[in-house]
């Protein structure tokens, strides 16, 4: 089997500075990932946390759809 070269998955944050000085952002690719921070660095950390929460929630929701069914789960590492 031929190996495929993988590349890192990158997300694009759309960032605005609010009138009260906070940075507010969301991921362009997954617009449901929204957060804020006092600095851009804090916003970046908060967006990463929000992304992890949404993925975790989606995983749980999807697994509920398969309750009582036979299925196979495999990890897919994307680096």
Image (spheres, grey):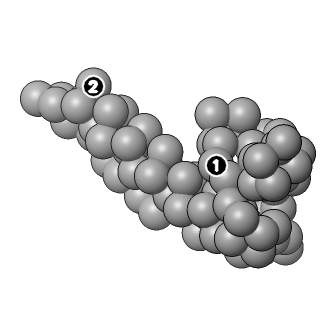
Could you tell me how many numbered marks the image carries?
A: 2
Q: Nearer the viewer, residue 7 or 10?
A: 10
Q: Which residue is mark 2?
A: 65
- Tell me what residue is drawn at x 16 percent, y 31 percent: 67
Considering the image in quadrants, where does the C terminus appear?
A: bottom right
Distance, label 2 to label 1, CA atoms, is 28 Å
79 horizontally vs 16: left or right: left
The circle drawn on residue 17 is none
Question: Which of the two residues, 78 or 59, is positioned nearer the viewer here?
Answer: 59
Rendering coords of residue 12 (x, y %): 87, 52
Any part of residue 11 in sight: yes
The quarter of the picture where residue 78 lies is bottom right
- The residue where tag 1 is placed is 35
> Which type of secondary structure does the marked residue at label 2 adopt?
helix
- Please indicate, yes or no, whether residue 2 appears anywhere in the rendered image: no
Please determine whether, in this image, residue 65 is positioned above or below residue 42.
above
Q: Residue furthest top?
A: 65
Q: Find the residue positioned furthest to the left.
A: 68
Percent position of residue 17, x then y: 87, 49
3 or 62: nearer the viewer: 62
Q: What residue appears at the point 65 percent right and 42 percent down from the top-left corner?
A: 34
Residue in view at x 35 percent, y 33 percent: 62
Where does the image place residue 23, in percent across and percent down from the top left?
79, 54
- On screen, residue 44 above or below 24: below
Secondary structure at numbered mark 1: strand
Measuring from the top left, give residue 15's x and y in whole percent. 87, 49
**Dot 1: within a 10 Å radius of its alpha carbon, few (fewer than 14), some, or many (20 or more) residues?**
many
Image position of 41 with respect to 18: above or below: below
Q: Closer to the N terminus: mark 2 or mark 1?
A: 1
- Residue 5 appears left or right of 59: right
């Amino acid at each position: 089997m031929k190996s495929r070269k993988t590349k890192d998955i990158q997300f694009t944050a759309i960032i605005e500075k609010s009138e009260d000085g906070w940075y507010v952002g969301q991921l362009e690719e997954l617009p449901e990932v929204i957060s804020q921070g006092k600095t851009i660095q804090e916003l970046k950390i908060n967006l990463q946390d929000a992304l992890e929460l949404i993925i975790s929630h989606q995983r749980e929701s999807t697994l509920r759809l398969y309750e009582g069914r036979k299925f196979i789960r495999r990890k897919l590492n994307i680096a």
